Amino acid sequence: MAYAADQRPFTILHLEDSSSDALLVRRRLRIDLPEVPVLWAATESEFKRALAEKGVQVILSDLSMPFFDGLAALDFARTNYPLIPFIILSGNEDAKTVRAALRSGASDYLFKTELDDLARSILQVAGNRADEVGGMERLASRARVLELSAQLLREKDFTRALRKVLEVAVAVLGADRGNVLLFEEAENLLRNAIAIGFPQEFMERYPTIQTDAPTACARAFRGQERVVVEDIHRDPDFAKLGGTVCESFGFTAVQATPLRGRNGRMLGILSTHYDRPYSPPAEDLQTLDLYIQEAERVLGLLGTP
């Protein structure tokens, strides 16, 4: 994974009591992020001194360590350095432990068998940090997201958790309705799984969507990025469906955002809909993105039904 030349440089602090594990991580990051310095701390005092003196931008920590474990380090960092992203890298794959770490404010949780994903996770949380330091308003959004994420972590059922994610998205974006479509890989289509504000007739009429359809959801799926259509009646792709079909949808504007599983594969599409021409403000979309990052981890732990 290449390190983008236009990215601001940053320093990683790695808390790990095992020298052999620390060396494995350093060797991997030397390949994937060759321009990023990695500081190693093996003890509580080394960890706290590095935070105070070295200008750390990302924290990477083991979970199970004697005297000063990962959760204690996370609590210290969240209290004293709340803007520094904190990634847990652990051999502990217990779901309750993962939820506890995320609930406590960890930015991500990776298993030590997932070193291939480490650089991607670091770049992602470092990018989020760069966005967040723009002002207290964004920090407040992050706090709001963490509060909502803590509520989501209490869910034990995938379908209920998915509905809660949709409820938050509809509220954050001020939408009139919304739905989530899950990807059915065997049939290469999107299945309408959860809906809010739509009549049952809509669910029955459009139980699935082909991935090559001109709708916003299918386009977001193919492009693997958000699609916003301010007015479907003026959108050239929706025009291919014909005015009668567009009228039958019962909405005028739509935004569609991809949902991904823990391994980065497409899980489906979350979409919100509006009865009027509308484009959600950028700050609301940023808040949604932060929440979805947290939600994807929870949904990944619960597993699709």
Image (cartoon, rainbow, N blue to C red):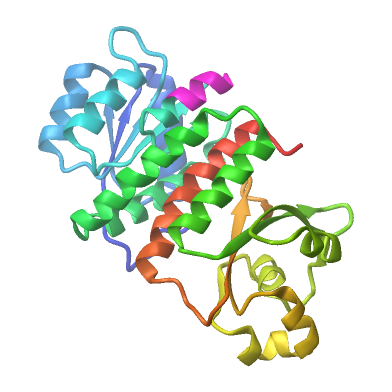
Q: Give the range drawn in magenta.
A: 93-100
* Residue ID at (38%, 70%): 282
* Side (left or right) of 299 relative to 20: right
Q: Which is nearer the eye, 251 or 42?
A: 251
Quadrant, the C terminus: top right
* Residue ID at (54%, 80%): 276
* Residue ID at (89%, 57%): 187
Instruction: Determine the residue located farthest toward the top in the rendered image.
Output: 67
* Side (left or right) of 87 relative to 58: right
**Residue 21 horizontal/vertical position (percent):** 44, 23
Instruction: Determine the residue located farthest toward the right in the rendered image.
Output: 187
Whether the magenta-drawn stretch holds residue 212 is answered as no
* Side (left or right) of 146 relative to 55: right
Judge whether 235 appears above or below 70 on screen.
below
**Residue 239 horizontal/vertical position (percent):** 72, 90
Judge whether 119 appears above or below 100 on screen.
below
Whether the magenta-drawn stretch holds residue 99 is answered as yes
**Residue 195 horizontal/vertical position (percent):** 68, 55
* Residue ID at (34%, 8%): 66
Q: Which is nearer the eye, 266 or 51?
A: 266
Asked which quadrant contains residue 262, the reply is: top right
**Residue 255 horizontal/vertical position (percent):** 56, 70
